[in-house]
């Protein structure tokens, strides 16, 4: 069952193709628009078309969102472009880090550079996203 779920600064778009997971900030880059805001006081939204649309505050369902929810349906329909944009964003960042590392090596071939914390974070984020993507909804 397709689903849009966001809370805690993260968004998950689940479909039979896999799961897109990222920060709301990165979702805005990948989707081309920010995720629809939560209503005042809400901390979480779960939308499953034709099934449920709870709006949640601190683990308590406070209200229900509209059904259908056109914005959620559009997000679900965009799963392939979300995957492509996320992949492109990671590839661009990896190329930047690779170029930076090669330049440092050329400048100081005998020096072992310290770990690049940004590159490590990118590697971890990408691996987490790819691991989640492979998770299929049952």
Image (tube, rainbow, N blue to C red):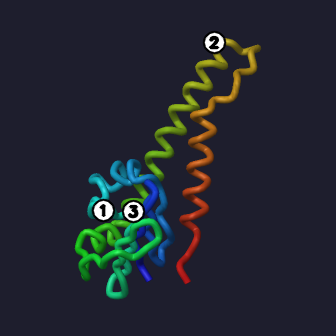
Q: Are marks 3 and 1 in contact (CB under 8 Å)?
A: yes
Where residue 71 appears, x then y in whole percent?
Answer: 25, 69
Which mark is first along the chain, 1 or 3? 1
Is 43 on the left or on the right of 103, as rendered? left
The foreground one among 79 and 125 is: 125
Q: Quadrant of residue 4?
A: bottom left
Q: Residues within 10 Å of mark 2 (few under 14, many from 20)?
A: few
Does dot 1 land on a helix, a strand or a loop?
loop
| Numbered label attached to residue 107 | 2
Disc 3 to disc 2, C-alpha distance: 49 Å
Q: Are marks 1 and 2 in contact (CB under 8 Å)?
A: no
Vertical order, 79 against 30 (above or below): below
Task: Identify the residue position indicated by label 3 in the image.
Answer: 43
Where residue 22 appears, x then y in whole percent?
Answer: 47, 55
Q: Residue furthest bottom?
A: 50
Which mark is first along the chain, 2 or 3? 3
């Amino acid at each position: 069952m397709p689903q849009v779920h966001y809370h805690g600064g993260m968004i998950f778009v689940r479909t039979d193709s896999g799961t897109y997971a990222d920060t709301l900030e990165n979702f805005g880059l990948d989707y081309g628009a920010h995720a629809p805001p939560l209503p005042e006081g809400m901390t979480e939204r779960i939308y499953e078309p034709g099934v449920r649309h709870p709006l949640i505050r601190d683990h308590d369902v406070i209200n229900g969102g509209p059904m259908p929810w056109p914005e959620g349906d559009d997000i679900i329909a965009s799963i392939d472009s979300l995957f492509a944009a996320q992949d492109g964003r990671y590839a661009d960042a990896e190329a930047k880090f690779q170029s930076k590392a090669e330049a440092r090596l050329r400048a100081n071939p005998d020096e072992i550079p310290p770990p690049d914390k940004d590159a490590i974070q990118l590697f971890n984020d990408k691996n987490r996203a790819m691991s989640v993507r492979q998770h299929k909804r049952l």
